[in-house]
Image (cartoon, rainbow, N blue to C red):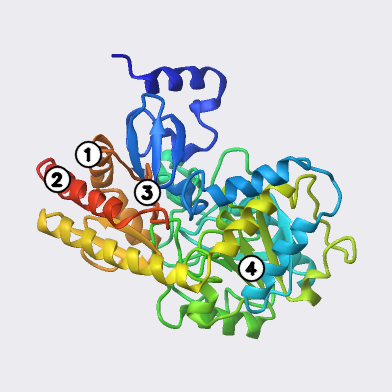
Amino acid sequence: MNDLNDEWFARAQRVIPGGVDSPVRSFSSVGGTPVTVDHGKGAYLYDVNGHRYVDMIQSYGAVILGHADPGITSALYDAISKGTTFGTPTRGEVLLAEEICARVPGCEQVRFVSSGTEAAMSAIRLARGATGRDRVIKFAGCYHGHSDGLLAKSGSGVAVMGLSGSEAGSEAGSEAGSEAGSEAGSEAGYLPGSLPGSAGVPVASVSDTIICPYNQVPSHDVLDEKVACVIVEPVAANMGVVLPAPGFLQGLRNACDAAGALLIFDEVITGFRVAYSNASTMCGVIPDIYCFGKVIGGGLPLAAFGGKAGLLKQLAPVGPVYQAGTLSGNPLATAAGLSVLNRLDENAFTTLASKVESFAAGLQSVLSDAGLEAAVQRYGTLCSVFFGTSNTVSDYDTASASAATGIYSKFFHHMLDRGVMLPPGPYEALFVGLAHSDADLDYVLEQARTAASETAMRI
């Protein structure tokens, strides 16, 4: 019998570069042919061969209620009957903005965009416009989209420039392509200046981008009066799930205040995923600017950045910082997002956190029983597995060391053969959603037991 996945991927490669519209989907990090999905329902994906998989990708966190959720589908039917886009203000964007601002401390206004990349790019432009400064600090292993200024890797040495994108690191982060994986990090921490992390990015575009190690607060020599902003994932979820060290986020808040720089929390993944609002409420640190995405679009292209009204009023048309988008605040996306947020009450997150806690503990036990050295890390409703270590993974260097073992790809294919769709890359979070039943998660753990034993025999 022909594998229709092979046929569809061959067709895709003829008309789409690499056969995919985002690099992580290509299976290049794990090998083999990507699964071409025909449809999804609840916690399951169905490929073009009709095979069913328990889906642990969940569109990299964008789907929290499950695929083809009836409530979201109904909201979309109602919205689409009225029109798909208008290029004018709509009620839906106001209602969704009100809901986000009501939930998130320190967020009084939001501006909608169509992707997390746009949100981070626009947030940085806002910070630069508000402070009159140019420099940006980001952290190795954190992914903030593919705008030129953020496709940077640290260092200025020949050792870094001598690596191609694929050699410098594997694909990292949800839909991250090669950006986070290409960051070389630095044994010495900060190195002045940055290098492009992709062909096509001019050196000038990253000359004001500074890369620092995650979980280390930059010194005043680095985070000084020339820095416009620090952008960070408060809980890193693009190099696996890496928790902030005690004092790290508060240290960033203090250092930014001392330097007059703005603090940006990229919560494209964690926002409305780890808690009723976001990670900042769990860690008790409030940034100046938030970036949101994934969940707030209900599975449609939607993201946002926001903060205090005084700061957001720097944006056009009332301020000098220009930002725009024809499809920003699209009525279909805002209808889907509002439908999701209306369902995500405190009880929903209590239920989901309990599921993930039990699942993560079960996965750790299964891997350990099989003799695989692994660390399953969890923050609220997010978890991931790092193979080749039993120690806490706290930064990109330790995350990349785990990825370099190659164990994940073996485990991935054993799970895929057993009807479990894991993210096709070792830097990804595992997304448990509200559509996953206890029986679904028990099934995943049952298959993981066998897959772990088979993986252990092949390393």
Nearer the N terminus, badge 1 or badge 2? 1
User: Would you say the residues marked 1 and 2 are in contact, meaning their CB atoms lie under 8 Å apart?
Assistant: yes
Residue positioned 28% across, 68% down in the render:
392
The local crowd at label 3, few if under 14, some if 14 to 19, many if 20 or more residues have their Cα within 10 Å, is many
Task: Give the amino acid at mark 1.
Answer: His
The residue under label 4 is: 290
Q: CA distance from mark 3 to mark 1?
A: 14 Å
Q: Quadrant of residue 55?
A: top left
Q: CA distance from mark 1 to mark 2?
A: 8 Å
Kindly report the distance in space between the C-alpha atoms of the residues bearing marks 3 and 2: 17 Å
The Cα–Cα distance between marks 2 and 4, rounded to whole angstroms, is 42 Å
Q: Secondary structure at mark 4?
A: strand
Give the labeled residue for mark 2.
450
Give residue 181's position: percent from left, percent from top.
Answer: 44, 49
Say whether residue 67 is left or right of residue 209: left
Instruction: Report which residue position mark 1 lands on.
Output: 414
Q: Which residue is mark 3?
A: 56
Horizontal side of residue 326 vs 373, given as left or right: right
As helix, strand or loop, the secondary structure at mark 2 comes to: helix
Residue at 42% in and 67% down: 188
